[in-house]
């Protein structure tokens, strides 16, 4: 099949590359010529494990090409995926200007029957909006269908998730269009659900909001654990053995960041309000999440007293491991609070440092965790990259001015860390620093 994919962000580029890998001819389209050039040279503009190899192979085998010309791509293809960004506006509602612009261009270029597939996470009702825009712009009354095919991939495992999705949701009001998209996904041999447009749009938001709800739920439980001497890691584990609850997304810590959960829950709240329903349940997910970084810094302050003149080392800056994405990363809020309180900040992240440096040039960026720990009064784990699991903690402790460890992701074993001579704080973990002689 000949497919155009508008937008080469995480969703668009990975989708395009995977469809090419499945044997389709794919045209990736972006308004940014620099991105298009990079893609055509085999350099993915985003960091995602496995993506570069797949991109290079499909370029070499001439199944994929990138361009800035969406109109031409529309004329050349039967199926056009819209995967453009939907950044939040000041009110938290998604800005649909890129979706609208893509739809208008597609409308003007219509030269025969086309299927336009919304893959961007767009508010409920956007399918109808795209349909109207195309109708307004088409020069001749060519037939077309709009389909909603939400994407569930996670950053950091985007290629693997796209090749092996839990489910494929195809929302279409016309079965002819749905069947064409079923055909496209058939080689993946994964469960497919065919729904109407509105249902597919809701499935995406309901899924992300529920996952965010799990995270905020366990973080609220973590706060109670801290007050009562209970342990949230054991609590979550025991809860998760119930298959109705499940282990996933019950890791307490600094809460969720990224380009999806904060934005999607916010947008969902707006949608629920717009339809005259009570958004309280969904709003609380964000209230709990927003409080996490401040609360974490408060724990550091409780230990160190005034933060002015203190040095805090941060391990991990990306919003989660295996990505250089720092959108809504908890690290940014934590750095902001630490600087506000007059602390000196040192940081290390395997890939995200250049992006943070563009926002906070005033902090010290280090070559590794050991360098970050030098003369620090506290070491705070922000993002649980694998390379932080097996650090030489004696070396870390010896490098520090005071061995205070704040584990924002509950990565470490509290007892082991205390035995190694650290004051250890984990989120929602029983505070037992009774034989603590580490405070200088
Ligand atoms: C999320 C969803 O997991 C994907 O299914 C969805 O397709 C995607 O949003 C999207 O809508 O595009 P993503 O934002 O890439 O994917 O990352 P997640 O792995 O879901 O992590 C989100 C945040 O939650 C991270 O900051 C992570 O640290 C945090 N998190 C996750 C927790 O704090 N606790 C957990 O137990 C799990």
Image (cartoon, grey):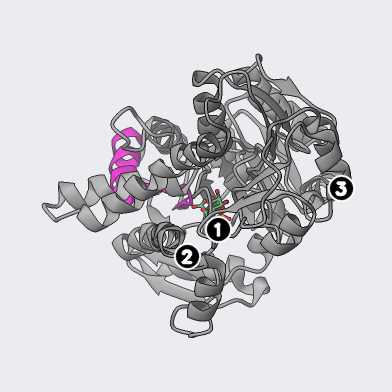
Q: Earlier in the sequence, mark 2 or mark 3?
A: 2
Viewer-closest of 337 and 105: 337
SS at mark 2? loop
What's the CA distance linking mark 1 and mark 2?
A: 7 Å
Residue 136 is at least partly visible in this image: yes
What's the CA distance linking mark 2 and mark 3?
A: 28 Å
Q: Which residues are magenta?
A: 114-138
Mark sitting on residue 431: 1
Residue 4 is at least partly visible in this image: no
Viewer-closest of 298 and 260: 298
Q: Residue 185, percent across and down?
A: 60, 68
32 vs 347, left or right, is left
Would you say residue 246 sits in the magenta stretch? no
Which quadrant is home to the N terminus?
bottom right
Q: Who's the residue at 67% across and 72% down the image?
A: 187
> In the rendered image, which residue does mark 3 sit on?
394
Which quadrant is home to the C terminus?
top right
> In the rendered image, which residue does mark 2 sit on?
229
SS at mark 1? loop
């Amino acid at each position: 099949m000949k497919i155009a994919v508008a937008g080469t962000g995480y969703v668009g580029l990975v989708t395009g590359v995977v469809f090419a890998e499945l044997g389709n001819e794919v045209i990736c389209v972006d308004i940014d010529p620099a991105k298009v050039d990079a893609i055509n040279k085999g350099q993915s503009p985003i960091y995602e494990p496995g993506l570069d190899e797949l991109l290079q192979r499909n370029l070499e085998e001439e199944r994929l090409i990138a361009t800035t010309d969406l109109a031409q791509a529309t004329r050349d293809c039967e199926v056009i995926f819209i995967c453009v960004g939907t950044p939040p506006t000041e009110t938290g509602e998604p800005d649909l200007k890129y979706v609208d612009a893509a739809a208008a261009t597609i409308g003007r270029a219509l030269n025969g029957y086309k299927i336009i597939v919304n893959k961007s996470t767009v508010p409920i009702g956007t399918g109808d909006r795209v349909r109207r825009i195309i109708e307004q712009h088409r020069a001749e009354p060519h037939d077309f269908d709009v389909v909603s095919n939400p994407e569930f991939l996670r950053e950091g495992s985007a290629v693997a998730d796209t090749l092996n999705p839990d489910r494929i949701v195809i929302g279409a009001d016309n079965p002819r269009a749905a069947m064409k998209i079923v055909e496209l996904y058939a080689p993946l041999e994964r469960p497919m659900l065919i729904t109407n447009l509105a249902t597919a749009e809701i499935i995406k938001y309901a899924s992300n909001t529920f996952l965010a709800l799990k995270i905020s739920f366990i973080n609220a439980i973590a706060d109670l654990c801290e007050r009562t001497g209970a342990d949230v890691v054991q609590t979550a584990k025991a809860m998760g053995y119930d298959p109705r609850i499940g282990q996933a997304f019950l890791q307490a810590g600094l809460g969720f960041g990224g380009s999806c959960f904060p934005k999607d829950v916010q947008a969902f709240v707006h949608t629920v309000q717009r339809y005259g329903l009570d958004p309280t349940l969904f709003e609380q997910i964000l209230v709990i999440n927003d409080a996490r970084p401040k609360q974490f810094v408060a724990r550091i302050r409780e230990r160190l007293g005034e933060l002015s003149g203190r040095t805090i080392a941060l391990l991990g800056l990306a919003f989660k491991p295996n990505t250089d994405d720092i959108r809504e990363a908890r690290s940014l809020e934590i750095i902001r609070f630490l600087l506000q309180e007059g602390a000196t900040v040192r940081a290390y992240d395997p890939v995200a440092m250049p992006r943070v440096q563009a926002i906070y040039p005033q902090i010290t960026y280090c070559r590794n965790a050991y360098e970050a720990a030098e003369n620090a009064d506290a070491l705070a784990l922000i993002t649980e990259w694998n390379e932080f699991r097996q650090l030489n903690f004696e070396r870390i402790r010896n490098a520090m001015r005071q061995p205070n460890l704040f584990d924002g992701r509950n990565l470490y074993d509290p007892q082991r860390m205390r035995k190694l001579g650290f004051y250890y704080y984990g989120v929602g973990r029983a505070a037992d620093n009774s034989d603590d002689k580490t405070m200088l």
